Amino acid sequence: MRDRFTRKSRTTRGSIPKHMRREVYRRDDRVCVYCGVECRAEELTIDHLIPLALDGLDEMTNWATCCRACNERKAAQPLEEFLDSLAMPVEELPVYGDPVIDNPAIPKQLRLLRRRIFDRIRRGKLAVSGKDAQKKLEKVYRRDLWETADGKLLEAEFPSLPGQVRAVIPEIRSIAKSKREFLLLVELAKSALTRSLIGSVLTGDIDVEARVRSMRKRERQHAMRKRLAQALRRFERAVRVTPPE
Ligand SMILES: [Zn+2]
């Protein structure tokens, strides 16, 4: 979910680029999420679990491989209604492309917490849709997070960090390979624009600092370049104040 923190929705709703379609089919082994049949090429479609007409997200987390027949039967029905007709529990539907749910380095309790939010949305019990869907989802996640033992620990450990930054500490921990990287990722988390890089562009298998420095030089988008430069400056100050061992 690349736009998780920037709240930008894709501009051309409903037209999923070819390479992303291929990724979804590969991810799902070309098996229809509803009937379990392996699709031939001409039967392959992508279903928006929560229909676009009902303000579903046009995002990885809301896309699933679906055979043509199931897609036609489902049409614009609410997801929970269609699942009821199949006697399929919502918990059986996968959540893909979420940076927390499938990340084994994040405490299981938090992954389940987030999973339950998706289930609530899919059951129509939680209205998270439209332009600000991402923002609302993260808000609900944070509200639930502070009620958990892990959330309370984070609050005690990082009392001076804003909640939006504190909430992504488990993700930052799963990426950072050193204290330096940790400090840099925390600074990046302070702006929604650079926070969106965490877990999407900046992952555990790259040299985070080198990537951020090269992005600051090469990035075309002015706002992003500016935020990267600001985060790097704060990071350098933080390193001077508390040199990482
Ligand atoms: Zn099917």
Image (cartoon, helix red, strand yellow):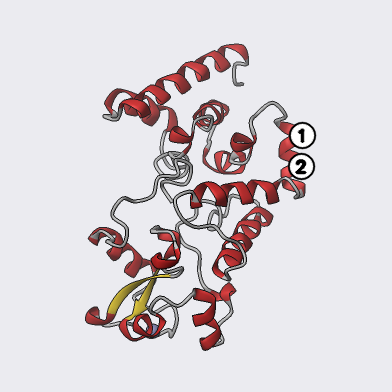
**Figure quarter occupied by ligand 1:** bottom left
Q: Give the residue at x 41% y 47%.
A: 2
Residue 26 left/right relative to 128: left
Picture coordinates of residue 129, whole percent (x, y): 49, 57
Picture coordinates of residue 25, whole percent (x, y): 33, 69
Q: Amino acid at mark 2?
A: Lys
Q: Which residue is mark 1?
A: 156
- What is the secondary structure assignment of the residue under circle 1? helix
Around disc 2, counting alpha carbons within 10 Å, would you say few (fewer than 14), some (14 to 19), or many (20 or more)? Answer: few
Rendered image: mark on residue 24: none
Q: Amino acid at mark 1?
A: Ala
Quarter-of-image position of residue 109: bottom right
Name the one closer to the observer, 136 or 53.
Answer: 53
- What is the secondary structure assignment of the residue under circle 2? helix
Q: Is residue 32 above or below residue 233?
A: below
Q: Give the residue at x 75% y 50%.
A: 148
Picture coordinates of residue 122, whole percent (x, y): 54, 68
Residue 148 left/right relative to 226: right
Q: Which residue is mark 2?
A: 152
